[in-house]
């Protein structure tokens, strides 16, 4: 199946879609931001591999040392996202993409591959059961059920940065940490700002705009994290309706 996929490169990035927001006009500014962010990562060994078709079928990963996530370790690859959606499900694409990542890690002489997951399935989280079929194991956890899964080739293991274990911040106002890795984020930020301004809700937006900032986020984080009353709530991207539900809890 390898001929059905392609990797995004500096040469083809402008002409290719990035899967998540193919036709939704309200996310096109997010697509531009994603492509800008991705272009700056490609020389670091970052990989965005997708089905050569018009669908949400892709894997995105990077060397752990340069991955914008508060996970630490030596010589690992970190998977940001593995997504197969709609009519493309059940056709072996997820397996083919993960196989590619694992073989790429071995070819690069890496110590293994890791990914953020959870004890119970959560939106925008890797499916633990799927990865365990490939030999991934839980190597670190948080008290609220998030897990770091790893497939080690040499016995070494990655870990959450110590700041992740806090899952808390001093401020009590609604606080959102966000990066630009996902095309949906700019629209979610604007919806959160608009709703909070209209309803007099204090909101702190924290742009995670560097590798150092990403490694220091005080919770689990791929590209989005929400705190309420000083406690970490979710990595689920929030539109206005979902934000209302969160605030009503």
Image (tube, rainbow, N blue to C red):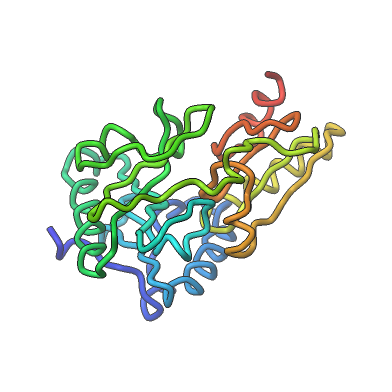
Q: Residue furthest top?
A: 249
The residue nearer to you, when weighing 9 against 15, is 9
Establish if 35 lies above or below 172. below
Residue at image location 52% in from the left, 58% down from the top = 68
Give the quarter of the image for residue 191. top right
| Quadrant placement of the C terminus | top right
> Whole-percent x and y of residue 18?
41, 60
Q: Is residue 218 left or right of residue 48?
A: right
> Whole-percent x and y of residue 233?
62, 31
> Whole-percent x and y of residue 177?
66, 47
Q: Is residue 3 left or right of residue 123?
A: left
Give the quarter of the image for residue 54. bottom left
Residue at image location 24% in from the left, 40% down from the top = 89
Q: Residue furthest left?
A: 1
Establish if 136 lies above or below 153. above
Q: Is residue 132 left or right of residue 9?
A: left
Residue at image location 23% in from the left, 54% down from the top = 153
| Quadrant placement of the N terminus | bottom left
> Whole-percent x and y of residue 67?
47, 60
The residue nearer to you, when weighing 55 against 226, is 226
Residue at image location 51% in from the left, 49% down from the top = 222
Q: Is residue 246 left or right of residue 106?
A: right
Q: How many marks?
A: 0
């Amino acid at each position: 199946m390898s001929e059905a996929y392609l990797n995004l490169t500096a040469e083809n990035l402008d002409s290719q879609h990035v899967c998540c927001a193919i036709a939704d006009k309200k996310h096109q500014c997010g697509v531009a931001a994603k492509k800008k962010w991705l272009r700056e990562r490609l020389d670091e060994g970052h990989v965005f591999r997708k089905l050569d078709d018009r669908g949400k079928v892709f894997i995105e990963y990077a060397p752990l040392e340069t991955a914008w996530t508060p996970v630490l370790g030596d010589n690992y690859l970190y998977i940001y996202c593995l997504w197969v959606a709609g009519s493309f499900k059940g056709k072996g694409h997820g397996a083919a993409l993960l196989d590619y990542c694992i073989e790429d890690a071995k070819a690069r002489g890496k110590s293994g591959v890791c990914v953020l997951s959870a004890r119970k399935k959560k939106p925008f989280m890797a499916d633990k059961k799927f990865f365990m079929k490939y030999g991934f194991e839980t190597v670190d956890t948080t008290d609220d059920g998030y897990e770091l899964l790893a497939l080690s080739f040499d016995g070494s293991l990655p870990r959450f940065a110590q700041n992740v274990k806090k899952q808390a911040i001093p401020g009590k106002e609604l606080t959102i940490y966000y990066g630009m890795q996902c095309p949906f984020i700019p629209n979610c930020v604007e919806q959160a700002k608009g709703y909070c301004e209209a309803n007099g809700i204090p909101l702190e937006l924290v742009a995670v705009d560097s590798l150092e900032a990403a490694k220091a986020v005080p919770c689990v984080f791929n590209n989005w994290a929400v705190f309420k009353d000083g406690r970490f709530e979710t990595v689920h991207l929030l539109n206005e309706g979902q934000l209302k539900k969160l605030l009503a809890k």
